[in-house]
Image (cartoon, rainbow, N blue to C red):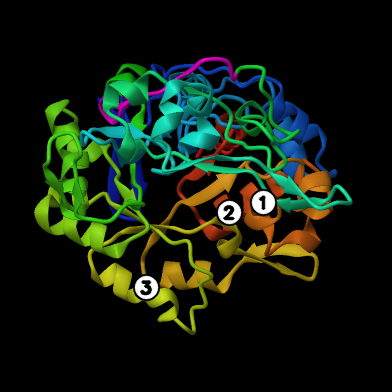
Amino acid sequence: MRGTIIFSGLILLVSSFAAGADDTSELPSVQLGPRPFYLVEQMEEGPLKTKLQSCADGPFLQSDFSIAHRGAPLVFPEHSRESYLAAARMGAGLIECDVTFTADLELVCRHSQSDLATTTNILGTPLAATCVEPFSPATFHPDGSLDRPASATCRTSDLTLEEFLSLEAKMEASNPEATSPEEFMQGTPRWRTDLFASGGTLMSHAQSIELFKSLGVGFIPELKAPEVEMPFVSPVTGAVFSREDFAAKLIDEYRSAGVSPNDVHPQSFYPADLGYWLKATPEFGANAILLDGRRYNPQSPADENLPSLEQIAGMGVTTIAPPLWVLLKEENGRIVPSDYALSAKEANLSIITWTLERSGRIREDVVQGTSKYFFQSVLDALKDDGDIYKVLDVLARQVGVEGVFSDWPATVTYYANCMKL
């Protein structure tokens, strides 16, 4: 039997090799490495730190609460085979493949259709000639200050699948002051590393399905917004590819691989995509997740032309996924659930959220630096690296999220095992 995780009535059946929902004897053990233990030791003294310290001896098992965001891109190139393997070894119960398409209408794992210049070695290969915006070097003012940053845009939709798979994944980064393609491909943030970034293996969506099946993890693909005009006409086959064709092909690849609809949790930022899945493929649509990236005000649900939470629930959607800062607020120096979080619960929507471990160090990169996005609503309540667990604890125990995306799944896996989520 497979392990189960319940999203307020939505049963997610996730591959876990478990003998039953309450029997973890056959769940795969995982390797967390030192980071979760470091973070716990950095916490201020108190009951939460004491509780997390008490779990240091494990055992640690795969957890459905721990969702791998693009694999393990804190250290490994995102959406690479190596990144996915690392995520599984750290106990992620679900792994994400962001899905876009190639010139010959094959589906591949990339966060953006146009990110090849910053996530692969394309600028160092002959395929640089296919880039819709060739590399343009930085220019500088006479005093040496930056005038125009270096840039390049290269799309999956300008490559065939074979060409795409010939590239190598690298850490997501670019150097705005680059004067050559080689310099542009550098720029990895100092809180990440290039130690494991050599020759990352790119994957098609179909290949990711087979890999995830072999790893015993669940599937949580995101249908990425096309960055070319739709319908798209394939320059290879001449076939016309609509947005609905794209959404349908994503589901068809799970059917072809023999994956149960209960194991697949397709995501999109666009309500129309979920509406399509609910109507055309209801067995898959039942598990669909609406990503909500707007600056949400419960009193102004018409912002950005997106439906209110009540309207979302009325569509048949059961799970919503906003960024973590939307679910939290600071109140007298404490982190508490936001009005949005309370509204989502009132609408009977289950919640997952994104993304931990994507902002660098709390003290240097978040509070005192520029990487504030994911913590922007609670900055006054954060002091040091260990406060990641303070945030996670409020999300889990007060907001009631049922899964958390992370760029380093070990951090969430440790907490989930300790709190028996």
Q: Point out the stretch of residues depicted in magenta.
A: 197-209
Q: Mark 3: which secondary structure? A: loop
Inter-mark Cα distance, 2 to 3: 24 Å
Q: Mark 1: which secondary structure? A: helix
Give above or below for 313 relative to 240. Answer: below
The kind of residue tagged 2 is: Leu
The residue shown at (33%, 23%) is: 163
Q: Mark 2: which secondary structure? A: helix
Which one is earlier in the sequence, the residue at label 1 or at label 3? 3
Contact (Cβ within 8 Å) of mark 2 with mark 3? no
The residue shown at (56%, 50%) is: 396
In terms of depth relative to the viewer, which is nearer, 210 or 107?
Answer: 107
Mark count:
3
In terms of depth relative to the viewer, which is nearer, 398 or 86?
Answer: 86
Q: Quadrant of residue 191?
A: top right
Contact (Cβ within 8 Å) of mark 1 with mark 2? yes
Give above or below for 384 relative to 4. Answer: below
Tell me if 137 is positioned left or right of 237 in this view: right
Q: Which residue is mark 2?
A: 395
Q: Is residue 19 magenta?
A: no
Q: Which residue is mark 3?
A: 306
The residue shown at (49%, 67%) is: 294
Would residue 144 be visible to someone looking at this image?
A: yes
Q: Which residue is mark 1?
A: 391
Q: Residues within 10 Å of mark 3 (few under 14, many from 20)?
A: some
